Image (cartoon, rainbow, N blue to C red):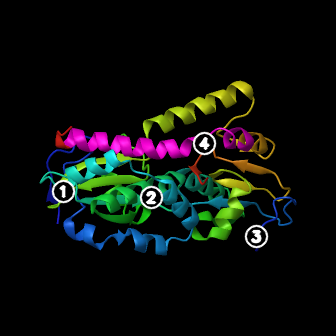
Amino acid sequence: MRVLVGKRPFMTQTTTVVTPERFDRALSYADYLAAIAVNRDQFQHYYDIARLTDDDVAFFREAAVLPSGPAKILVIAEAWCPDVFRGVPVFARIAEATGMTMKVVLRDENPDIMDEFLLNGKARAIPVAIFYTRDHQYITHWTERPEVAHAEVARIRGEFSAVHPTVDLKALTSADMPTVKAFFDARLPQHYPAWQVETVREIRALLAAAMAVA
Amino acid sequence: MGPLDPDRPMSGKVPIVYTIRGCEACVRLLERWNADGMEYEERRAELSQATMDEARTFGSAVPIIVWPDGRVEQGFQGHIGCYII
């Protein structure tokens, strides 16, 4: 069954393979965590440090009770991916705080779903959090990492290349790797908690825009 | 083959390549090697925590190639691949 959908501003097609039945068949977050082979400790760590403010909780709860509000989240994920184990726990926090039903599908076992939510119509970037109303109308979706994360990674890569102009970050060798690791380890992880905060802020903004609420 | 010791050169005769399902750079690398008739051992990092941890001792993104002489390379033909940390 293919379900006609309404407003889908970022999507590449106007029908969806994500039927209500397929949503229901997807893994619960608990079942997903039980099934993954890697990074369970990372999911737990980033869940532990993920925080919603009282204002965030109020926003999501108010949105969730609206007829056009989010009641379901479908997440596209693969457990090896750092953006997934940092981002999906944030989605879980949102779902728990609001009573939304969150389900997870694996990207590489559901290529038809992934194809509907390609980043810029091309990249199979994950995680993707897709928000639906109670009657399974698409609302909006969020992909991969917040904009500030893209900017910070680009800035740090630029700084690295300025300091180490002979090192090609796209073709590293064993001689370069300790230098690269030390450089990025000293600069990136400190930003991860802020990226989680930004993830919440961006999702709020997307939902507010899609639902036309403040 | 058991876990590698990152402090010692490889004793095997074929390169080990750490990959992940769905990694396009990994696929391209293996397609090239297969076309060239090259022998290698593929270790899929997403299939076990031990292999993931092992891969992370060598690099931050797959594909990661560990050559028999101990040299390590990451990425393929200008593509970083998929970050694992």
Residue A195 magenta-highlighted: yes
- Residue A87 in the image, given as x and y percentages of width and height: 45, 52
User: Local crowd at mark 4 within 10 Å, few (<14), some, or many (≥20)?
Assistant: few
Q: Which residue is mark 3?
A: B3
Q: Amino acid at mark 3?
A: Pro
Q: Position of residue A52 (x, y in %)?
A: 39, 50
Q: Chain of mark 3?
A: B
Quadrant in which the N terminus of chain B appears: bottom right
Q: From the image, tell me which residue sits under label 2.
A: A89
Q: Residues within 10 Å of mark 1 (few under 14, many from 20)?
A: many
Chain part drawn in magenta = A181-210
Q: Which dot, 1 or 4, sits closer to the camera?
A: 4
From the image, tell me which residue sits under label 4: A190
Q: Which residue type does callout 4 highlight?
A: Gln
Q: Marks 1 and 3: CB-CB under 8 Å? A: no
Which residue shows up at 18% across the image and 40% down it?
Answer: A213
Q: Are marks 4 and 2 in contact (CB under 8 Å)?
A: no
| Label 4 or label 2, whichever comes before in sequence order | 2
Find residue B20 and report its horizontal and vertical position in percent: 57, 60
Residue indicated by mark 1: A133
Rendered residue at 61%/71% (across/down): B48
Judge left or right: residue A17 versus residue B73: left
Measure the C-alpha gap from mark 3 to mark 4: 30 Å
- Residue type, mark 1 in image: Thr
The question of residue B25 being in magenta is answered with no
| Disc 3, SS | loop
Q: Are marks 1 and 4 in contact (CB under 8 Å)?
A: no
Residue at x-position 67% and y-position 67%: B51
In the image, residue B78 above or below residue A48: above
Q: Are marks 1 and 3 on the same chain?
A: no
In the rendered image, residues at marks 1 and 4 fall on the same chain: yes
